[in-house]
């Protein structure tokens, strides 16, 4: 899969709240870096996406893609989202994709509880 295809699958799976499908984009060696933590492996990554898709940004929440750029192995997005419980502004992710899998991802956002 190309970087664009992996990004599209990732976003579609996230929008559906399908954590198993989200994890198809990663491997046991994948790393996700956030402002508060560095997560490695499928179990650690699963925990984050389970929390995001069930507690913070469940399916059906408002989501706005501000920018999407894909160049070679790098995908960069800026987005905003809002649910009944949280508001994410200036959300940004960078994904490095090799061999059809996300090897490294960074994430940051301004997050407000409602």
Image (cartoon, rainbow, N blue to C red):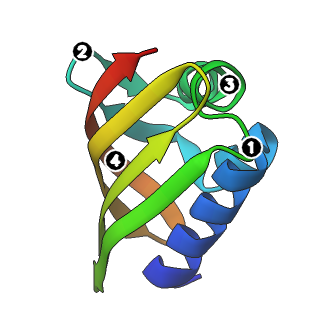
Q: Provide residue 109's location: percent of width, then percent of height.
A: 26, 35
Q: Provide residue 94's location: percent of width, then percent of height.
A: 28, 56
Q: Quick one: label 2 or label 3, which is nearer the N terminus?
A: 2
Whole-Å distance between the Cαs marked 3 and 1?
A: 12 Å
Q: Which mark, residue 59? A: 1
Q: Secondary structure at mark 3?
A: helix
> Label 2 belongs to which residue?
36
Whole-Å distance between the Cαs marked 2 and 1?
A: 24 Å
Dot 1, crowdedness within 10 Å: few (<14), some or many (≥20)? some
Q: Nearer the viewer, residue 19 or 15?
A: 15
Q: Foreground mark, 1 or 4?
A: 1
> Label 3 belongs to which residue?
50
Whole-Å distance between the Cαs marked 2 and 4?
A: 14 Å
Dot 3, crowdedness within 10 Å: few (<14), some or many (≥20)? some
Q: Secondary structure at mark 1?
A: loop
Whole-Å distance between the Cαs marked 3 and 4?
A: 17 Å
> Label 4 belongs to which residue?
105
Above/below status of 83 relative to 48: below
């Amino acid at each position: 899969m190309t970087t664009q295809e992996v990004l599209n699958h990732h976003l579609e799976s996230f929008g559906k709240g399908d954590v198993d499908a989200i994890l198809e984009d990663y491997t046991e060696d994948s790393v996700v870096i956030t402002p508060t933590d560095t997560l490695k492996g499928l179990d650690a990554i699963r925990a984050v996406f389970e929390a995001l898709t069930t507690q913070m940004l469940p399916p059906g929440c408002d989501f706005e893609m501000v920018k999407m750029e894909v160049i070679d192995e790098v995908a960069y997005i800026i987005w905003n989202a809002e649910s009944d419980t949280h508001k994410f502004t200036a959300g940004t992710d960078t994904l490095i994709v090799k061999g059809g899998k996300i090897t490294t991802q960074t994430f940051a956002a301004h997050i407000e509880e409602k």
